[in-house]
Image (tube, rainbow, N blue to C red):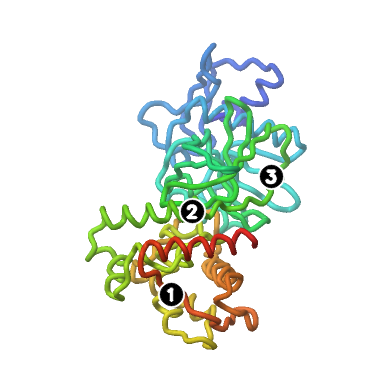
């Protein structure tokens, strides 16, 4: 902790004390602002000065020990916001919801709770804390503490491994892209992962923008440029995903493979228009080939040329598949709208561009032609190349 009460009940802020060069006697009594239990001031040549509860103390506002990395990040963020002229409090206890965010920020009649999280915690905790903030009109803002290692690169995008914990930090920005913010106190740099394009459940293509903390405003003013997907790379990765699925999945227990075989289709010979990347797809944990196949088998395949495809009907079909556990969605506590409708709409718009649908009016599409099902790998490659050529001219 960076704050505590002294024996007169005055709040001591170690960040301000350090800035002013105020010496604090570590032997004087200090108390936790929340539970009022005694805490000790720890400082030295190596340690970042901070308050700590005594061993075996139980305090509802602290759930995990703070590392030096976390403390330094919290200090940096506090100083940055304070120097920007914003009203900011560190570790402000909110008794109504029994939460104590790392930082509480006021700007333009809005209140933000910034949580700087370095270590993995259960997603349920993040969701609960986020809901507590929103219940009292406070906007939760989670920042991942550390760096995200690049596992490879392809053209203008890097390849990252993101687990469920990383995904929980994502949020939608004004450009309708899923973003992930992180801060590294060692480099004093803020990073933004944008254009997150899941290739598998954990393998993600993304563009990274890095700026010094001093160059940013709050809320963050990152600008990102559009990135074109390499569809050949995508199609190759999709094929690898299907092959692994066939090898490792238990066919009769896997709903996706089960549906394919039930419909007398081959997993490796599906129309290439099934499993194409679209905006908003990061909300879905299932691979695009899975949910797009279900849309095709539940609706498209039964619709003749001139027939209607209605967005609201597809949305209901999608939710039924979720209920049956055929489609899995990500737990994204900072994204309060599910965006399923928007994701499906983006897919329909893509199919419209490819010539399979005509949009008659918003959310209503007419079937122009059916997907061609390849008979063999040679057919598949030919159909993929035709689709690639069309998509690259988009």
Picture quadrant where residue 239 is located: bottom left
Q: Residue at x 28, y 63 (%)?
A: 254
Circle 1 Cα neighbour tier, 10 Å, few/some/many (<14 / 14–19 / ≥20): some
Residue 153's place in the image compared with 56, above or below, is below
State the residue position of label 2. 234
Viewer-proximal residue among 377 and 228: 377
Quick one: label 2 or label 1, which is nearer the N terminus?
2
Instruction: Determine the secondary structure under disc 1.
Output: helix
Q: Which mark is residue 220?
A: 3
Q: How many marks?
A: 3
The location of residue 350, given as percent across then percent down, is 58, 68
Q: Are marks 3 and 2 in contact (CB under 8 Å)?
A: no
The location of residue 4, given as percent across then percent down, is 56, 30
Q: Give left or right: position of 307 versus 104.
A: left
Residue 80's place in the image compared with 356, above or below, is above
Q: CA distance from mark 2 to mark 1?
A: 20 Å
State the residue position of label 1. 296
Q: Residue at x 24, y 63 (%)?
A: 251
Circle 3 Cα neighbour tier, 10 Å, few/some/many (<14 / 14–19 / ≥20): few
Circle 2 Cα neighbour tier, 10 Å, few/some/many (<14 / 14–19 / ≥20): some
Eye-nearest disc, 3 or 2 = 2
Q: Are marks 2 and 1 in contact (CB under 8 Å)?
A: no
- Pick the quarter of the image with the C terminus: bottom right
**Furthest residue toward top:** 45
Q: Residue at x 60, y 80 (%)?
A: 358
Viewer-proximal residue among 211 and 243: 243
The location of residue 86, given as percent across then percent down, is 74, 40
Q: CA distance from mark 3 to mark 2?
A: 30 Å
Q: CA distance from mark 1 to mark 3?
A: 39 Å
Viewer-proximal residue among 302 and 118: 302
Residue 370's place in the image compared with 116, above or below, is below
Instruction: Determine the secondary structure under disc 3.
Output: loop
């Amino acid at each position: 902790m960076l704050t505590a009460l002294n024996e007169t009940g005055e709040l001591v802020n170690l960040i301000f004390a350090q800035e002013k060069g105020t010496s604090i006697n570590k032997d004087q009594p200090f108390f936790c602002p929340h539970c009022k239990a005694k805490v000790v001031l720890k400082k030295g040549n190596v340690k970042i000065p901070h308050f700590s509860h005594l061993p075996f103390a139980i305090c509802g506002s602290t759930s995990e020990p703070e590392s030096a990395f976390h403390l330094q990040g919290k200090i940096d963020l506090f100083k940055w916001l304070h120097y920007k002229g914003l009203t900011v409090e560190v570790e402000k206890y909110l008794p109504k919801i029994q939460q104590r965010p790392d930082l509480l920020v006021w700007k333009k009649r809005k209140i933000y709770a910034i949580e700087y999280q370095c270590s993995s915690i259960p997603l349920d905790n993040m969701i609960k804390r986020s809901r507590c903030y929103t219940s009292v009109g406070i906007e939760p803002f989670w920042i991942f503490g550390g760096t995200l290692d690049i596992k490879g690169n392809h053209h203008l995008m890097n390849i990252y491994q993101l687990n469920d914990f990383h995904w929980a930090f994502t949020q939608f920005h004004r450009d309708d892209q899923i973003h992930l913010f992180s801060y590294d106190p060692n480099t004093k740099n803020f990073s933004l992962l944008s254009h997150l394009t899941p290739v598998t459940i954990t393998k993600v293509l993304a563009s990274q923008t890095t700026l010094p903390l001093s160059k940013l405003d709050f809320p963050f003013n990152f600008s990102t440029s559009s990135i074109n997907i390499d569809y050949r790379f995508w199609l190759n990765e999709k094929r690898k995903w299907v092959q692994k699925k066939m090898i490792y999945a238990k066919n009769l227990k896997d709903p996706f493979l089960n549906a394919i075989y039930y419909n007398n289709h081959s997993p490796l010979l599906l129309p290439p228009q099934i499993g194409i990347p679209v905006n908003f797809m990061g909300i879905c944990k299932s691979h695009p080939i899975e949910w797009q196949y279900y849309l095709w088998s539940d609706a498209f395949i039964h619709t003749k040329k001139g027939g209607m495809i209605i967005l609201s009907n597809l949305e209901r079909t999608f939710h039924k598949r979720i209920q049956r556990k055929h489609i899995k969605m990500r737990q994204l506590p900072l994204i309060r709208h599910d965006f399923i409708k928007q994701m499906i709409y983006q897919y329909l718009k893509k199919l419209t561009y490819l010539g399979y649908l005509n949009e008659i009016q918003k959310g209503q599409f007419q079937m122009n032609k059916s997907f061609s099902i390849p008979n063999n790998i040679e057919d598949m490659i030919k159909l993929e190349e035709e689709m690639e050529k069309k998509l690259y001219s988009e």
